[in-house]
Amino acid sequence: MLTKMVQQQGGRVTGCGDLKSARGEIGRGVFDVVVLDNRLPDGTGYEFYSELERVCPQSIVIMITGVPELSQAVELTRNGLFDYLTKPLNVNDFAACLKRVQQRLSHPDPFAGTAELMGNSTAIREVIQSLTQLARHATSTVLLLGETGTGKDLAARMLHRLTAANRSPEPPYVPLNCSAVPAEMFEAELFGAEKGAYTGAEKKREGLIAAAEGGTLFLDEVTETPMPQQAKLLRFLDSHEYRPLGGNALRQFTGRVVAATNRTLADEVRQGRFREDLMFRLSVATVRLPPLREHISDLELLTQKLLAELCDKYDRKQPTVRQSDIIALRDYHFPGNVRELRNLLERALLRTSETAAVLAFDSAWLSSGARVETASVGKSRPSLPPDRQLNALETQEYCLIQEALRCEDGGIRRAAARLGITHQALMRRLEKWPELRHTTSRSN
């Protein structure tokens, strides 16, 4: 069944009944994707995954299991597993997974490989100056604020590089998306756990704090930290001491913690979703990443540099961009910021002939299609519950989730795939807005 589904999507499939034959096939060629069952005649997929990381690190790996283990799923996901599906396998879930695989293969992380924040505007120069000053204090906690797509992870990596300058070997940089970790596993993921600390903890495991020792721990979407764990995070930030789950000995962390959020912390505190004392602790050293509309003078430079990266990615000659298209881009609001700009350029490049000298940019789409997407958020606003007090960003997020659920007839995993977020991240938002669980194509 899986073979037929992949073939229907245009993929070429090699099927193996055991690990021995899989090793032989991997030795003969490179695979974009590996779909791996856990229980096999001559071993387990869980054990084989570490081998795959060594011999074909470029492959996207999907694990399928009939006996799911939460601790195993978290560990594999932390180590790069693309998805973890359970039996009996839902055909729609696998189809949605394949769609995300195709998106990953054609659209990798927009900021991956980008060395520095790009721009010559006053706004960007101020960000770089702030990061340079903070780099002198190697253990200070830093909070990065900014809308989605402004490059908070890029800023965190830049701060890490500035702090680690002239250090050899370079200390570790360890990111954690707080929305992607189940609440019950958050403490073990961050602090580590001793053997037997919880059900399924068959061996001792190091947490991400230990992995980031001497370097940088980046807590992205920090406002998604579960409320019970926020007090423990606060104590860690105050003392830089932590105790693994189930352990007795205190450990000392000598690196830096960088946190980031696209939300307003004060609003989160007022809504009862974030501790006020943790907000004050995080806000000591704050850097705000400006939205693209606030440094639109950088747009032409960003366009040229991002287009150069894309042409390098696709191994093709860089076409020129018409000045009329630059003007059209400057007139656009860019709710998705630099990430959206890159996606627009990539879409234009893929529809441009390799022999063309000019980028086939569809400015009509920018003035109509893209604005329709933004307008659709506004059209969804009347369906907000009257008793909800949401800020502008929450309203947009609420409506986007509502629209995704409507398009997927209430299917949560499919809606998460449509939104480009993890299933766990969407579940967290549905805990906050439970009425959205009932959204279907018929209810709207």
Image (cartoon, rainbow, N blue to C red):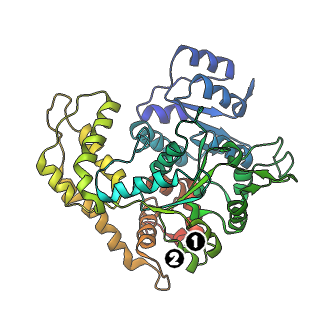
| Type of the residue with mark 1 | Lys
In the displayed image of the protein, which residue is found farthest to the bottom? 387
> Where is residue 289 shown, x and y percent of the image?
41, 59
Which mark, residue 267?
A: 2
> Where is residue 49 shown, x and y percent of the image?
66, 31
The residue indicated by pointer 1 is 432
Q: Quadrant of the C terminus?
A: bottom left
Q: Is residue 124 visible?
A: yes
Q: Quadrant of the N terminus?
A: top right
The answer to which of marks 1 and 2 sits earlier in the sequence is: 2
Regarding mark 2 in the picture, which secondary structure is present there? helix
Q: CA distance from mark 1 to mark 2?
A: 14 Å
- Is 328 placed above or below 213 here? below
Of the pair 418 and 164, the residue shown nearer to us? 164
Tell me which corner region of the image, top left, top right, bottom left or bottom right, holds residue 110. Answer: top left
- Is 54 placed above or below 92 here? above
| Type of the residue with mark 2 | Asp
Q: Is residue 69 visible?
A: no
User: Which numbered disc, 1 or 2, marks the residue closer to the eye?
Assistant: 2
Q: How many marks?
A: 2
Judge the density around disc 2: few (<14), some (14-19), many (≥20) Cα neighbours within 10 Å. some
> Where is residue 116 shown, x and y percent of the image?
40, 44
> Where is residue 46 shown, x and y percent of the image?
71, 34
Regarding mark 1 in the picture, which secondary structure is present there? helix
